[in-house]
Image: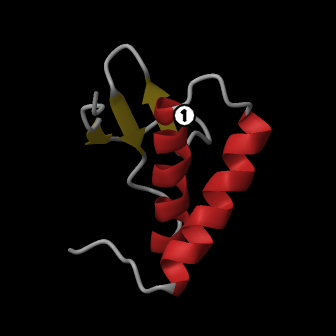
Amino acid sequence: MKKKLPKVIVRDLPGDICGLACKADNTIEIDPQIASERAALEVMVHEALHLADWKMTERKVKFRAKYIAEVLWAQGYRKIK
């Protein structure tokens, strides 16, 4: 069974939080104040990994998100404005 894609919500998040994933709502929240497009891509991948495998440790999510974002960025993937 294919998972439904999460709803992405862009809103100001408290403190130094850049992104949040909510399994119950199947949502990803992203702070619009993220410093760069590259960082925003990594945060989006990071939160998507949480939703894809909620049991994955934060350390593994961070490592994998950084690697996947680097690969995508090197291939020219960018947010269309």
Which of the 4 quarters of the picture holds residue 53? Answer: top right
Q: Position of residue 65 (x, y in %)?
A: 62, 54
Measuring 42% from the left and 20% from the top, which residue is drawn there? 23
For residue 44, side relative to residue 60 (left or right): left
Would residue 14 be seen by someone viewing this image from the given angle?
A: no
- In this view, which residue lies farthest toward the front? 1
Measuring 62% from the left and 42% from the top, which residue is drawn there? 16
| Front residue of this view, candidates 2 and 25 | 2
Q: Quadrant of the N terminus?
A: top left
Q: Quadrant of the C terminus?
A: bottom left
For residue 32, side relative to residue 39 (left or right): left
Measuring 33% from the left and 41% from the top, which residue is drawn there? 11
Helix, strand or loop for disc 1:
helix
Question: Which residue, given by chain and number where applicable, does mark 1 sit on?
Answer: 50
Which of the 4 quarters of the picture holds residue 24? Answer: top left
Q: Position of residue 40 (x, y in %)?
A: 47, 61
